[in-house]
Amino acid sequence: MLYMVEMIVQIPHSLDPALVAQIKQDEKEYSQKLQREGKWRHIWRVVGEYANVSIFDVQSNDELHGLLSGLPLFPYMQIKVRPLANHPSSIVQE
Amino acid sequence: MLYMVEMIVQIPHSLDPALVAQIKQDEKEYSQKLQREGKWRHIWRVVGEYANVSIFDVQSNDELHGLLSGLPLFPYMQIKVRPLANHPSSIVQE
Amino acid sequence: MLYMVEMIVQIPHSLDPALVAQIKQDEKEYSQKLQREGKWRHIWRVVGEYANVSIFDVQSNDELHGLLSGLPLFPYMQIKVRPLANHPSSIVQE
Amino acid sequence: MLYMVEMIVQIPHSLDPALVAQIKQDEKEYSQKLQREGKWRHIWRVVGEYANVSIFDVQSNDELHGLLSGLPLFPYMQIKVRPLANHPSSIVQE
Amino acid sequence: MLYMVEMIVQIPHSLDPALVAQIKQDEKEYSQKLQREGKWRHIWRVVGEYANVSIFDVQSNDELHGLLSGLPLFPYMQIKVRPLANHPSSIVQE
Amino acid sequence: MLYMVEMIVQIPHSLDPALVAQIKQDEKEYSQKLQREGKWRHIWRVVGEYANVSIFDVQSNDELHGLLSGLPLFPYMQIKVRPLANHPSSIVQE
Amino acid sequence: MLYMVEMIVQIPHSLDPALVAQIKQDEKEYSQKLQREGKWRHIWRVVGEYANVSIFDVQSNDELHGLLSGLPLFPYMQIKVRPLANHPSSIVQE
Amino acid sequence: MLYMVEMIVQIPHSLDPALVAQIKQDEKEYSQKLQREGKWRHIWRVVGEYANVSIFDVQSNDELHGLLSGLPLFPYMQIKVRPLANHPSSIVQE
Amino acid sequence: MLYMVEMIVQIPHSLDPALVAQIKQDEKEYSQKLQREGKWRHIWRVVGEYANVSIFDVQSNDELHGLLSGLPLFPYMQIKVRPLANHPSSIVQE
Amino acid sequence: MLYMVEMIVQIPHSLDPALVAQIKQDEKEYSQKLQREGKWRHIWRVVGEYANVSIFDVQSNDELHGLLSGLPLFPYMQIKVRPLANHPSSIVQE
């Protein structure tokens, strides 16, 4: 089941740079693991913004919330989730 | 080059149903041709809305505008385009 | 799986009253069938508005979109869908 | 009498973690007590957000404000309240 | 129990003037009856707008929705309802 | 002359609690004095929010601004003022 | 007493051109009469828009609403009114 | 003097196609004349929208309003004007 | 040439009170000098807000930006500028 | 390929002034280098705001994001990017 997830990252300027670097590293590993598992199907950078647009493929709303709220950057993110369905014109029906 | 395109369709209720059906048919053919050509990479339905979220892969802004303004449903659409770039965490670099 | 769905109804004043009455009747029957099936778990009126807030319990995004886009009033609705998950404080875990 | 209450939680990053943990614990107990009393009828997590959507069943506006402003997390919340009424299509009339 | 109700009136220009005059007359009588009954406690004109701000005093959400959806001008109104409670600083406690 | 004034209070979490308590006390006395003088005609709590909706009855814009900017909580408030006039349907003409 | 009034004009395209011309003429006369009386102190065109920003000088909210709702173009206007007061830095105190 | 002007075009679907074609032709000639005169310095299409972003170089606000309100498409446009000034980092100072 | 300038002042609560008092004093002198020179034609207080609406009369966009960015309070302001033109109904043509 | 980029700068008041001055200097050099290379084609100041509107001419979305995210002021900016295409009325076709 597919969801479009938009994530805007806003890290407080006052946060310790070393901590920030660690969180970002953890975030990258966390994300790439899910990508390899096929759950985080796409992640693209929105040009000009510290934000991404992603497509998740998971079994349920609860699974998605678990994955998102587990993001190391979650406390510093504004996230908007939109559930997606098959489009009648799509030549790929999931 | 990737772009996220959000399309909300608002067909006036007063439009002749036969004309609407024809436009929708043309739209489907137009879209599927571009999907087969790899330019319209993804099209998903936003659940609950007469709207879609799509990912286009084209060579330039001008090419994208040509494709979008050529949509049979273009006169009845609100379209928002966001250019995408490779995300440093993505395991797929275009 | 639960979703919160907000529906604002805007029927054009110019629509034939008899047609409107029929659509509303169909809508009621359509809704009550889904309620009896447990898919449309709650439907409440937003005080002062021709709008409702509903809780759906379905198996997938696609199922939900099928149900919503099949609503007789769908062409005259603004719909916003928010996927819900279990809340850690809830004494009812689905 | 039913109300839909949307709560977005924004805890300042600078707050002492131990204090935060205590407040969250108090919040959970406070909420579960009201749920057992039937006043806080539903609480769902909005997927991807530190926010919930809840349905309260209370006797008056004043009672509701008392319950909400008494939430341990109240100082860190954005709350929107919408009064609900019976929907003519609902197969459950309160 | 008190509610603040904001009503913006938007009558289509195409509506028959005689019908409009009749609806407005019915609206005035409907409103003044409720005012005399003490349910529609205040109604003020928002300067410069075809809109009013009103204070209702009713027993329940359902009663309020019944009164509002029964307004002759209801089909041509945008209504926003905010439940009110006693303010700790008010020298009048309801 | 009547004005509707909406006040949203946002006190920084970092402010000294003793100072906050003092300001709130001063605010209450300030408000109740104006209420007794008939200038602050109504003050209601917006359910679920640290906000109020008030009706002021003063002689001029300048007088209203003087009263509002003199509020002890003024530095921590978002205030929106809407001038009100007599409504043709009101059974009370000021 | 001063008020800033912003007026956006939206005349339906379907309105009879002769009627529109007449209304505009009436509007100009109406406005210039009030300007000569000193009530409509300033009227400026917002560059690029069929809109104006005006400063009114009247005795009360009710007087202002009477003047605005009497505008021939009133049915085709979106109006926003903001009450103004003397600014402590102004070298002109009204 | 430079201004950024954003123009969104919304032509009613009900307008006679021949009239629309004529207006568009007039608009093109009107625009190209001003471009050749150096007043309409840039005009770009916003990708995916029936809208443009333009840079005007004129002597005054009044001149700009005259040019914009004279656009054949003016009645069907939403226009937003932002005055521009020299940027301290710009290697071109006007 | 006239411009309407709306200025909302948001001084951080943490700023040293003595510094704030000095900045405000400088702001008043800066403003009154420009008023006497006829450049800052009007400055009014928006009732209930730490904000003003002003009318500037300057020769160019660049001059206006110089004046505004030179305001002692500029770092603590949200400013919106709208260029104004002569209104055809105005009995005063600049 | 052209893009319109709007940049609003919000530097925290608490940042060390010397650091701020250095960042601004780096920003100016960074920008002017790109201007000389023809990538940053235009940069204009939005009157009254610490913001600019710029036109970039680059080969791809990725190149643009690299340039923008490399801005010394990037961490303190809100950036909005809109891809531009040739306008059919433009006398300059890129």
Image (cartoon, coloured by chain):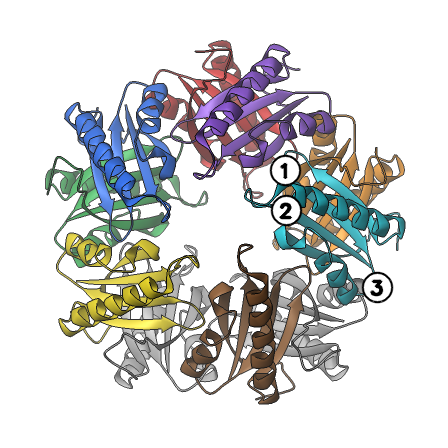
Chain colours: A green, B blue, C yellow, E brown, G cyan, H purple, I orange, J red
Query: Which tag, 3 or 1, sits closer to the chain's start?
Result: 1
Asked if marks 1 and 2 fall on the same chain, the answer is yes
Q: Residue at x 61, y 23 (%)?
A: H87
In the rendered image, is residue A29 in sight? yes
**Relative to E27, does residue A52 appear above or below in the rendering?**
above
Which labelled disc corresponds to residue G59?
A: 3
Kindly report the distance in space between the C-alpha atoms of the residues bearing marks 3 and 1.
30 Å
Dot 1 amino acid type: Glu
10 Å crowding of disc 3: few (<14), some (14-19), many (20+): some
Given contact means CB atoms under 8 Å apart, are the residues at marks 1 and 2 in contact? yes
Front-lying residue, E30 or G51 = E30
Front-lying residue, G79 or G32 = G32
Front-lying residue, B79 or I58 = B79
Say which chain tag 3 marks: G
Query: Which tag, 1 or 2, sits closer to the chain's start?
Result: 2
Tag 3 secondary structure: loop
Q: Hey, which quadrant is residue C87 in on the image?
A: bottom left
Residue C45 in picture, x, y percent from top left: 36, 72
In the rendered image, is residue G87 in sight? no
Dot 3 amino acid type: Gln
Q: Hey, which quadrant is residue B27 in on the image?
A: top left
Kindly report the distance in space between the C-alpha atoms of the residues bearing marks 1 and 2.
8 Å
Which labelled disc corresponds to residue I38?
A: none
10 Å crowding of disc 1: few (<14), some (14-19), many (20+): some
Say which chain tag 2 marks: G
The label nearer to you, 3 versus 1, is 1
Residue C4 in picture, x, y percent from top left: 28, 63
Which labelled disc corresponds to residue G49?
A: 1
Which labelled disc corresponds to residue G8?
A: 2
